[in-house]
């Protein structure tokens, strides 16, 4: 299963906010064997949102888009998703009913547009905040506030399921360039993929579909590099 | 000036690494009045890198791409950028001369491919690490290790210059929905843009090209919302 993440918000582009939502979703999806193949941040502009949603909707099995939900002028994600699908936004009676019956709001409390979703979308209820999310044609629209996003994602997490994968990590104090021949030998010997991430030492991440193979590959490598404890 | 950032790396997509490079570059460029209009993370795959570089090269004034430099099998950024431009990678004599004369390496120290850049690119020297960066046709190729990326970016920062912009921020404890009419009035009254970021309270960011207008708008708002100190 191949997934793309889209984060909406000028504040992320300007570096005011770190895109921890994408990090969290990447971890949760990875754990489930699902590959995130693209993460893109777009500005609060309907046409930009629509253009990227349209492209990724055509390319990936599912698209998760976070941020830009809510009542203010810069909350444009629902309009962007609707435009990508050639639909209008329309007030969701189901979302409105949930907000008034379960959410504890009166219709008068709710700002105009609060329950507007792309026409035909299924609402996702927001147990932590106000703005509902939505699912439509494999596009999952979630809030940008991390606590709201996480709670809403957990309600749909079972839709995301890939091949089981196993990961082991080796940390070495050697320079990356010195490791090249050993990493090549490792990949010839074992059916695993290896990521090499330099920083303060080098982090090596070994991933594969067979648990014993991953363990054996990590063990083989640990015996051959200077370990960084 | 409109800029796109591309970050290369499976480790970012999988949530193993937070994309703080994009945050830092967004801040530095914003300070200089340059708009970052897209941030995209792509996997360690030449064709994926090439496809996004090609698209953004055609769309934005400059593209900054970070990560995937170095000697290991998953360091594919130079190949991806070269492919996007229909070029090959070739050993840069200038980069090699710098590494041996200034960098303190012998040719024997350097792993094969260390000084390979897209043919015709200008090398950017790495004062903190080994792998050189490159500039070619408005595409800036920088390392992924944050200390190396930052040092190399500061060497080219003067290429990035936009309209001066002024920013002021107002923090309120009111819910975002309650603010809608005042934010609309603010934008009718002052030539500024306003970002509204809910979380624990709401952060309001006022941006404009005239310093006094931004200050006056922030003052007007401060007198009309419950401030969150």
Image: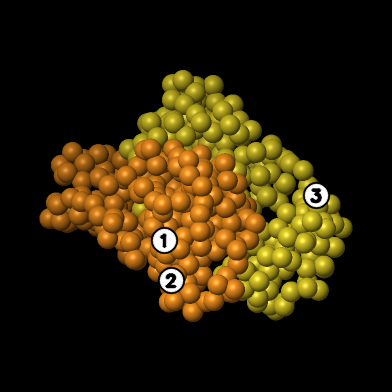
Chain colours: A yellow, B orange
Q: Are marks 2 and 1 in contact (CB under 8 Å)?
A: yes
Q: Is residue A229 left or right of residue A79?
A: right
Bin the neighbour count of mark 1 within 10 Å (Cα to Cα): few under 14, some 14-19, many 20 and up.
many
Verify CB contact (< 8 Å) between mark 3 and mark 1: no
* Residue picked out by circle 2: B98
Label 1 sits on a secondary structure element that is: strand
Look at the image and tell me in which quarter the N terminus of chain A lies: top right
Mark 2–mark 3 distance (CA, rounded to whole Å):
43 Å
Judge the density around disc 3: few (<14), some (14-19), many (≥20) Cα neighbours within 10 Å: some
Mark carried by residue B123: 1
Which residue is drawn at the image coordinates 65% and 77% (left, top)? Answer: A173
User: The C terminus of chain A appears in which quarter of the rendering?
Assistant: bottom right
Q: Which residue is drawn at 25% across and 55% down?
A: B161
Place residue A60 in its image quadrant.
Answer: top right
Same chain for labels 2 and 1? Say yes or no. yes
Q: Do labels 2 and 3 share a chain?
A: no
Image spot of residue B166 (x, y percent): 21, 56
> What's the CA distance linking mark 2 and mark 1?
9 Å
Q: Where is residue B149 in the image (x, y as percent from the top left)?
A: 44, 64
- Mark found first going from the N terminus, 2 or 1: 2
Query: Does residue A172 appear to the left or right of B197 in the view shown?
Result: right
Front residue of A130/B197: it is: B197
Asked if residue B66 is positioned above or below residue B128 in the image, the reply reads above
The location of residue B215, given as percent across then percent down, is: 17, 56
Q: Residue at x 70, y 58 (%)?
A: A194
């Amino acid at each position: 299963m191949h997934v793309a993440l889209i984060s909406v918000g000028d504040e992320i582009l300007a570096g005011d906010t770190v895109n921890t939502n994408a990090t969290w979703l990447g971890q949760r999806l990875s754990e489930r064997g699902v590959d995130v193949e693209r993460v893109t941040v777009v500005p609060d502009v309907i046409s930009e949102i629509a253009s990227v949603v349209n492209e990724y909707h055509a390319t990936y099995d599912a698209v998760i888009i976070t941020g830009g939900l809510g009542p203010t002028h810069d909350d444009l994600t629902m309009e962007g998703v609707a435009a990508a699908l050639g639909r209008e936004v329309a007030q969701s009676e189901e979302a409105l009913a949930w907000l008034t019956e379960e959410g504890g709001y009166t219709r008068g409390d709710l700002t105009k547009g609060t329950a507007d979703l792309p026409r035909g979308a299924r609402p996702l209820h927001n147990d932590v905040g106000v703005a509902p999310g939505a699912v439509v044609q494999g596009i999952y629209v979630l809030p940008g506030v991390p606590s709201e996003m996480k709670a809403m994602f957990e309600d749909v997490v079972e839709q995301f399921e890939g091949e089981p994968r196993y990961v082991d990590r080796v940390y070495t104090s050697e320079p990356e360039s010195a490791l090249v021949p050993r990493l090549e030998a490792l990949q010839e010997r074992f059916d695993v993929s290896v990521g090499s991430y330099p920083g303060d030492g080098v982090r090596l991440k070994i991933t594969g579909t067979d648990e014993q193979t991953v363990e054996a590959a990590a063990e083989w490598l640990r015996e051959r590099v200077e370990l960084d404890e």
